[in-house]
Image (cartoon, helix red, strand yellow):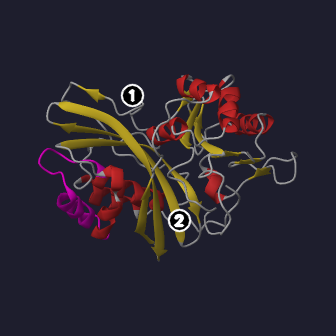
Amino acid sequence: MTPTGPSSPRRRAVLGAFVSAALGAAGCSRTAAPAGHPRQEDPTRGGSPSPSPGLPHTVLWRPTSAEVQPAAKLRAVRLVEAIGAWAAGQGGAAAARARVAALGLPTALVGRAGPLLPTADEAALQVVYAQYGGILSRSASVLVVCRQWTRRGGTTRAGGSTVDVRLSRSGSDWTVDALYPARPGPALRSLAPDIRTALSDDRIVLPPAAVADLRSGQVHTSAARALLALARTYRLEVSVVRSGHPLDVFGTGRPSDHPRGRAFDVWRIDGHAVVDPATSRGLIERFMRDAAAAGSYNVGGPVLLPGGGAGQFFSDATHHDHVHVGFRA
């Protein structure tokens, strides 16, 4: 992604109201997680069935105080939690519409939920991270990265998605206008060696949609090689690779490198969230420079680095919460 427009002033006072509305509607645990660091990370990376009928404990995700627009992120996350998690006997579109209505959001959004609303007796959903796909003064794209577990009869399945949630702002309130869940495509039987190695490297943490992206064969080997090069020095937690990202750079008509399989975003490095003010700027700067050394022509993050080729490094409000690593091919 390349730079977008400026951000608007932070408005945190609305967070409490959003949380109160969501607690009864989201179908998740009422236990709050430390800001930006929910207890999650089930090691399962696919959708293979388990004989256990139990679902894991999940927690409501919440943004940190360092966010550019925490209210926008929270609005997007609570919607995804409300649609994608439910107790026994509360499945189906009608019940999902009731949960969405309780948040004061349009119930028609449920019709765009796609993989978030499978046929199941009950479901648990854990938001891994919520990242900006773009943030402008009165509109936003929030990419909600999640894992989901469903139970049908005596069988549980682990999966998940990344949902591009589009929002608009009126005054201090954000509303949701549209949902675009990830659609990675079917897995290939045979993958390039670098792709296979990246999928098996435990220093590269991939959410479900990103795993499916690599398995689909639609991610360029340049991105996989860079992931492997960076993993030799860092433990990197990826938020988005290809699917679930806006097709164009948000607010423009320029195609993004993500849908073409030529980019990935990293939200946590060696256990330190990029958005966290306590994370060493030196760590982020080193990571960004190492990403460029690994072949990226377009590295964005919360720090504007000098040097590099023309436009190689950039920083804006959208990339306040992650590092973008893009490739020409």
Res 104 quadrant in image: bottom left
Q: Amino acid at mark 1?
A: Thr
Residue 241 placed where, x, y %? 57, 44
Q: Is residue 56 left or right of residue 272?
A: left
List x then y, in percent, for residue 129. Answer: 47, 44
Q: Say which quadrant the N terminus sits in.
A: bottom right
Q: Please state the extent of the stretch shown in magenta in the rendering.
A: 84-106
In x, y percent, where is residue 247?
Answer: 58, 60
Q: Is residue 116 above or below residue 41?
A: below
Q: Nearer the viewer, residue 150 or 306?
A: 150
Find residue 329 and report its image quarter. top right
Q: Callout 2: helix, strand or loop?
A: strand
**Left/right of residue 32 with respect to residue 36 in the rendered view:** left
Q: Disc 2 marks which amino acid? A: Ala
User: Does the magenta portion include 105?
Assistant: yes
Q: Between residue 275 and residue 294, name the one nearer to us.
A: 294
Q: CA distance from mark 1 to mark 2?
A: 31 Å
* Residue 217 vertical placement versus 2 (above, below): above
Q: Which residue is mark 1?
A: 44
Q: Which element carries disc 1, helix, strand or loop?
A: loop
The residue pinned by badge 2 equals: 140
Q: Is residue 146 magenta?
A: no
Residue 55 seen in the current view:
no
Q: In the rendered image of this protein, does residue 75 appear above or below residue 115? A: below
Residue furthest out toward the bottom: 170
